[in-house]
Image (cartoon, rainbow, N blue to C red):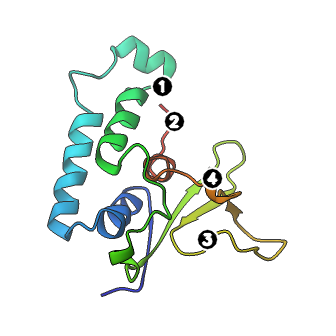
Amino acid sequence: MFELKVGTSSGGLVVLGLDILHLTVPQCQSLFQTLARKIFDPTRRRRLLSILLADEVYDTAVFEDTLKEYFGASRRILDVQPSLLSTGKVAVTATSINDGSLYIFTNYNGTAPHRAESVYGRLRPDVEHEPFVWQVARATSAAPP
């Protein structure tokens, strides 16, 4: 068993599936394939002209709704059931589309103060505003729509 799992993009989705949803590796593989089929369903793709003009190959609303369906719309990254307190640590990375800044989402560092000058941004200003798991999944797997 691994004590810390870190992932980016599809790897971030797998890490969230393994430790947040407590899926097995085959279940994660199946979930990833299901997500890909729903999000990139050819019948939902926009027309060629829309793809060329807007650089969109998938419907953002379908993408976000699918992530909410699988990861839960209201589950936060630090939400842990008392029976799962010994679950593994998870870190998922993402970057800002504005300036390429690195962000890291974790289920283990809470709201404790950090050193003043970190090399990465922290998207957890306080417990009430910590991200939902689906938002973490969206951020790590984000591609411009």
Disc nearest the viewer among 4 and 1? 4
Note whether 81 is above or below 143 in the view shown.
Answer: below
Residue 80 at x, y = what percent?
42, 68
Q: Which residue is mark 1?
A: 55
Residue, far right: 116
First reached walking from the N terminus: tag 4 or tag 1: 1
Q: Are marks 2 and 1 in contact (CB under 8 Å)?
A: yes
First reached walking from the N terminus: tag 4 or tag 3: 3
Look at the image and tell me in which quarter the N terminus lies.
Answer: bottom left
In the rendered view, does 145 fall on the left or right side of 35? right
* Amino acid at pointer 1: Asp
First reached walking from the N terminus: tag 1 or tag 3: 1
Q: Which residue is mark 3?
A: 110
First reached walking from the N terminus: tag 2 or tag 1: 1
First reached walking from the N terminus: tag 2 or tag 4: 4
Q: Which residue is mark 4?
A: 128
In the foreground, 27 or 143: 27
Residue 106 at x, y = what percent?
54, 68
Residues under labels 4 and 3: Cα distance?
Answer: 12 Å
The residue depicted at 41 percent of the width and 61 percent of the height is: 12
The residue depicted at 23 percent of the width and 30 percent of the height is: 41
Q: Secondary structure at mark 3?
A: loop
In the foreground, 102 or 89: 89
Residues under labels 4 and 1: Cα distance?
Answer: 35 Å
Q: Which mark is residue 144?
A: 2
